[in-house]
Amino acid sequence: MHSDPHISQPKPMIPVEAQERILQSSEAIFMRMGIRSVSMDDISTQLGMSKKTLYNYFEDKDQLVTTVVSRHFKQKCLELEACSNQAHNAVHEFFLILDRIIIDFTSMNPIVIHDMQKFHPLAYEAFTRYKQEFVLACVRQNIERGKKEGHYRTDLDIDIISKYRLESIMIPFNMSVFPPEHYTLVSTAKLISENFIYGLVTPEGRALVEQYINERRK
């Protein structure tokens, strides 16, 4: 039986679309479950795709994880740049970025970083590179902007404070200090971030901090 050429046939999924679907689904599973506990079988089942087809796109789980992580952080770079461009001032930028962090942390299992570091060194290297190069530069630029605007103290050592902020973002992932059964990534990150920004600001900047905190509590 021949198909009627006048009836539109379903468009076959091209490889790029299939790969993107795999990456999106894998990222969601890894964020929710962690990395180590998720198998290629789990991913193929979630996708409704045979494991053979999955392996046509990624030769092993490590390659999949590394690709997911690299893709994730490219997207984060775009988001941080958008926050900087949209911000009215440095304090506003800080809170726009914190909003993005909270969105990510809401659906993130804290064991993800540990799993990456222990079992997927190439993925962890991509994460470290993103953190040490891009995020650190964003933090430095924010502090410089805040000082110029008069919202951050002029006596701040930008090098030390920017590195301190970078490390403070990672504190909630220390599960020996903040076990997940007692603390959430979101609440811990918010408290640490709010305490951090209060240490940077001038009286004018403090008024902005309180304004943005109050807006987010409504």
Image (tube, rainbow, N blue to C red):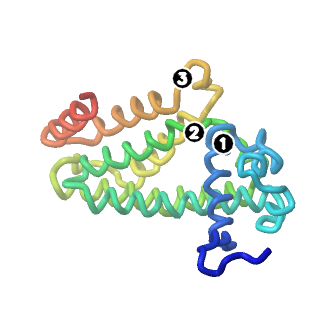
Give residue 103's position: percent from left, percent from top: 44, 42
Q: CA distance from mark 3 to mark 1?
A: 16 Å
User: Neighbour class for label 1 at 10 Å: few (<14), some, many (≥20)?
Assistant: some
Please tell me whether residue 50 is drawn above or below residue 171 in the rendered image. Answer: below
Q: CA distance from mark 1 to mark 2?
A: 8 Å
Q: Which comes before the other along the chain, label 3 or label 2? A: 2
Q: Secondary structure at mark 3?
A: loop
Q: Secondary structure at mark 1?
A: helix
Q: Which comes before the other along the chain, label 3 or label 1? A: 1
Q: Which residue is mark 3?
A: 183
Task: Give the amino acid type for the residue marked by disc 1 in the picture.
Answer: Val
Please name the residue shown 78% across and 44% down the image: 42
Please name the residue shown 48% across and 42% down the image: 169
Give residue 73's position: percent from left, percent from top: 54, 59
Q: In which quadrant of the rendered image does the N terminus lie?
A: bottom right
User: Taking 216 as reference, is 58 left or right?
Assistant: right
Q: Secondary structure at mark 2?
A: loop
Q: Which residue is mark 2?
A: 108
Q: In the rendered structure, are the residues bearing label 1 and label 2 in contact, judged by CB atoms less than 8 Å apart?
A: yes
Task: Give the amino acid type for the residue marked by disc 3 in the picture.
Answer: Tyr
Q: Which residue is mark 1?
A: 112
Q: CA distance from mark 3 to mark 2?
A: 13 Å
156 or 174, nearer to the observer: 174
